[in-house]
Image (cartoon, rainbow, N blue to C red):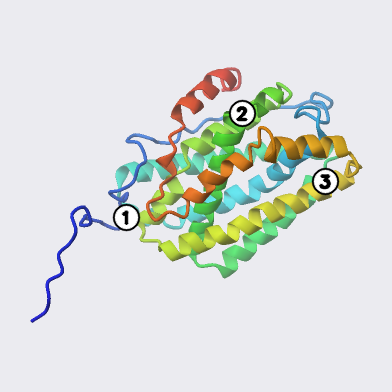
Amino acid sequence: MNAIVPIKPGKLRKRVLGTIDTLSKTPKGMIPQIRRPKFTFAEGDVPRYWWDNNPIKTLLLAAMSSGFPPGERFFIDSVRHFESQITDPELKKAIKGFIGQEAHHSREHDMLNGYLQEQGVDLARLENEVLGFMNWMRKNLSPERQLAHTVAVEHFTAMMAEEFLLKFDALEEMDPRMAPVWAWHAIEESEHKAVAFDVFKAVGGSEFTRITEMMLVSVLFPLFTSIHLYQLVRDDGQLGNWKAWRETLNYMWGKPGVFRKLLPAYARFFKPSFHPWDHDARDLVEKAKQRWLGDVL
């Protein structure tokens, strides 16, 4: 006679592929809003070092911006691949919102990168490097792993949006013509932070793929950013600006140590019960909307 193994209370739950997992913590009705800002910059409109008059801080964000257009197009494609498999009405709406927001991020950062390129910051070369890597992943990774890559990077961008740009004083330190671009992007990264994750869960993505892809992204994301920052700082003749390096490293890892304070949020991704909405930043986002978006939307 076969032994009957009792199911522990709380372990049995219905799960249907294509629907949001019954344990999803995404707030009901959290559909990313598609905004259509039109940021413009004229030549000489913004100071060269527009974040805290610091070349290292400024070029760090410029380096990140260089990868946004090809990266966000990759994210859209990875989610769209599974869109036809999704049956949950709310998740389908969220996917539409995610795609719309990411498409506008790509467009606006194309504009911003073009402006910085005209000011002598060579982002085109960096963007081509990121595009080449995105195309390599398209050819060599399975659709599931491409979606897991999006899930992992979205966790990084949501952390930086909520715990770096919106919580601390980075936006206040930026030139007032530049800050709204980063505020808008940060707000929307928070709004859609769980869409790719919920799609991954809904189509039966494996925990092994999710965790191992985050391990790879944890190496690649800082590596690409560091290399690109070095290239921009070198080209700008600021490698020997020890004051700017000291201020930046202290800001990121010392006091207030914004990157250091991201580590607990980063580590939570590896918990089996992790969900992006474990950290609910809606109050923070609402304050940022009122502060930064009134004049640009």
Quarter of the picture containing the C terminus is top right
Q: Position of residue 108 (x, y in %)?
A: 65, 36
Snapshot quadrant of residue 293 = top right
| Disc 3 crowd, CA 10 A, few/some/many (<14, 14-19, 20+) | many
- Which dot marks residue 168? 2
The alpha-carbon separation of the residues under discs 3 and 2 comes to 25 Å
Q: Single out the residue that lies furthest toward the left.
A: 1
Mark toward the viewer: 1 or 2: 2
Q: Between 120 and 255, which is closer to the camera in this rendering?
A: 255
The alpha-carbon separation of the residues under discs 1 and 2 comes to 38 Å
Q: Between 40 and 129, which is closer to the camera in this rendering?
A: 129
Q: Position of residue 43 (x, y in %)?
A: 83, 27
Q: Which residue is found at the position 71% from the left and 50% from the top?
A: 225
Q: Position of residue 141 (x, y in %)?
A: 55, 67
Q: Position of residue 271 (x, y in %)?
A: 43, 54
Residue occupied by mark 3: 232
Quarter of the picture containing the N terminus is bottom left
Residue type at mark 3 is Leu
Please tell me whether mark 2 sits on a helix, a strand or a loop: loop
Q: Earlier in the sequence, mark 1 or mark 2?
A: 1
- Which dot marks residue 169? none
The alpha-carbon separation of the residues under discs 1 and 3 comes to 44 Å
Residue occupied by mark 1: 18
Q: Which residue is found at the position 83% from the left and 50% from the top?
A: 231
Q: Which residue is found at the position 15% from the left and 69% from the top?
A: 5
